Image (cartoon, helix red, strand yellow):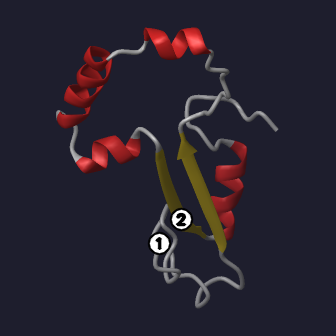
Amino acid sequence: MDGISCDRCGKGLLLDEDVRYLVQIVVQAAYDPMEISREDLKKSNRDEWNSLLKKLETLTEKEAQDQIHREFRFDLCPPCQRVYLETPLPGLSSAG
């Protein structure tokens, strides 16, 4: 992530290679819009909110944040970029 070396193989970038590749990964909670009716609001009560708050209290700030949003940045040399494009998620075949 320093732009000086490949985060996959450690090879020097810009000195040993003419180009480097930046991989940016965003992992975020999927948001599905939902309609909230008056009946839904009537069902919600203080006990449900207190239960939710107690669950949140058991998480560290990082754990709570990771459940919502996390970003990664990696620098890759050309050979590692080709490998990454073929298999971005090891164990799964390429979707593209």
Q: In which quarter of the image is the C terminus?
A: top right
Residue 88 position by quadrant: top right
Q: How many labels does the image show?
A: 2
For the residue carrying disc 1, how many other residues have a C-alpha within 10 Å: few (<14), some (14-19), or many (20+)? Answer: few
| Disc 1 secondary structure class | loop
User: Residue 71, image x and y in percent?
Assistant: 50, 56
21, above or below 19, in the image = above
Q: Which of 58 and 9 is in front in this view?
A: 58
Q: Nearer the viewer, residue 47 or 26?
A: 47
Task: Kindly report the distance in space between the C-alpha atoms of the residues bearing marks 1 and 2.
Answer: 5 Å
Q: What residue type is labelled 1?
A: Met
53, above or below 15, in the image = above
Q: Is residue 40 left or right of residue 88?
A: left
Q: Which of 66 and 94 is in front in this view?
A: 66
Q: Residue at x 64, y 51 (%)?
A: 84
**Residue that mark 1 sits on:** 1
3, above or below 67, in the image = below
Q: Which residue is drawn at 21% across and 44% down?
A: 60
User: Residue 4, image x and y in percent?
Assistant: 50, 83
Q: Residue at x 50, y 17 (%)?
A: 41
**Residue that mark 2 sits on:** 74
Tags 1 and 2 touching, CB below 8 Å: yes
| Disc 2 secondary structure class | strand
For the residue carrying disc 2, how many other residues have a C-alpha within 10 Å: few (<14), some (14-19), or many (20+)? Answer: some
Residue 52 position by quadrant: top left
Q: In this view, does 9 lie to the left or right of 38?
A: left
Q: Earlier in the sequence, mark 1 or mark 2?
A: 1
Q: In this view, does 9 lie to the left or right of 49?
A: right
Point out the residue furthest to the right here. Answer: 96
User: Residue 72, image x and y in percent?
Assistant: 50, 58
Residue 57 position by quadrant: top left
Q: What residue type is labelled 2?
A: Phe
